Amino acid sequence: MKKLRMIATFRYLNISDNIKGGFTLMPLVNITNDPEIIKDILNQEFITTAGTIESSHFKDANHIIYSECDDTFFQGLGSQKALAVWLHWLGMLIKDAWLIKDHAIECDIAYCNMKSGIVSEWSNNSIRLSSSFSSGVKFKEVTFSLSELAELEEKSFKLQSYLHQKSSSTFNEFVDKQFSRTGRALRFISAARTECHPAIKISHYCSALESLFSTDSSELVHKLSERIAIFLKDYGYDPCDIFDEIKSFYGIRSKVTHGDSIQPKKIDKIPNLSVRCDELTRVILNIILNNDEVLKVFDGKKDDFEKHFKNILLNS
């Protein structure tokens, strides 16, 4: 039986609390800033293999992400393929961390060490996606507390289990009729996060909101703004303000998607608009995902969804 050790770190992630031992983010994915564990993981063999630059990157990191198991968990795929699978899991965590807060977390290098007796095999790989904050800012740290890591673990497990159940994970066809509204919205959010320019980010956020709230293209902007305003009213948001904000996002989105320019006096406001659009989209997704009854409405039948909002509108 071969033993595997995976090693990575999330660039631009700062852990504010001390983690004694390792905290499990998902099965076979642990995170720690415990000096004793890190010293064992970043041993001389790792330093020799990774080289001066990469080993310094790991030593200077605020934390280490790691996994230790035997190769039966990866069905004998070998170190390179096992690492690719593990990185896919890390990618899921990076995406799901958006549900906690805005961030620009990346994972630009990871290593796998496979041992069988005296034979030691190394491989490395990375997640080749660069993200940015909703304002467009890159290369900036975000801080997570231990309680926020625990929240991420809980949300990610629930979300990924649900998307798998609904055939709406990254392995399923995005444009298929059976793909869930929430799954489709999350795809557009991922696109927004990897886009640099806040105007195009807004366009992707709007597509995410359309995935959740629209059922047809008739009077789309008005109907969408109205539904979102009504939806957020019960959560302490002023419906008139939300209605106007959603329309302002669509004003930018319309210019971007039709290849039009934006007036100079409005350009400086775009980063703040993108931040606000990101905030509202996060609030909406968390409301939906945290309530099974609400989730059932959004991922239910189209006619039932329209009836739900018609009843709220006419009875409010």
Image (cartoon, rainbow, N blue to C red):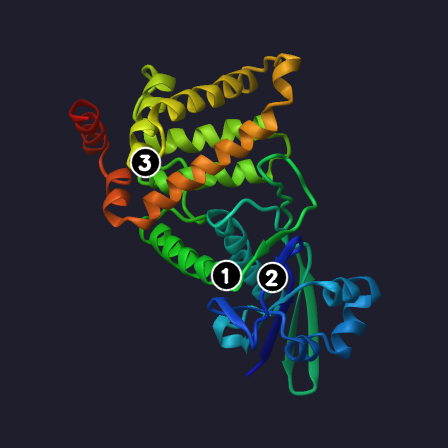
What residue appears at the point 36 percent right and 53 percent down from the top-left corner? 164
Report the amino acid beneath label 2.
Answer: Ile
Give the position of the C terminus as an image quadrant: top left
Judged from the image, the secondary structure of the residue bearing numbered disc 1 is helix
Badge 3 is on which residue?
177
State if disc 1 and disc 2 touch (CB < 8 Å).
yes
Locate residue 16, reporting x and y percent. Answer: 60, 62
Among the two numbered marks 2 and 1 on one chain, the one whose residue lies closer to the N terminus: 2
In the image, is residue 210 above or below residue 139?
Answer: above
Report the amino acid beneath label 1.
Answer: Leu
| Cα distance in 3D space between marks 2 and 1 | 9 Å
Judged from the image, the secondary structure of the residue bearing numbered disc 3 is loop
User: Dot 3, how many residues are within 10 Å of its Cα: few (below 14), some (14-19), or many (20+)?
Assistant: few
Badge 2 is on which residue?
15
| Cα distance in 3D space between marks 3 and 1 | 34 Å
Locate residue 246, reporting x and y percent. Answer: 43, 24
Badge 1 is on which residue?
149
Specify the label residue 173 is tagged with: none
Instruction: Specify the quadrant of the image occupied by residue 215.
Output: top left
State if disc 1 and disc 3 touch (CB < 8 Å).
no
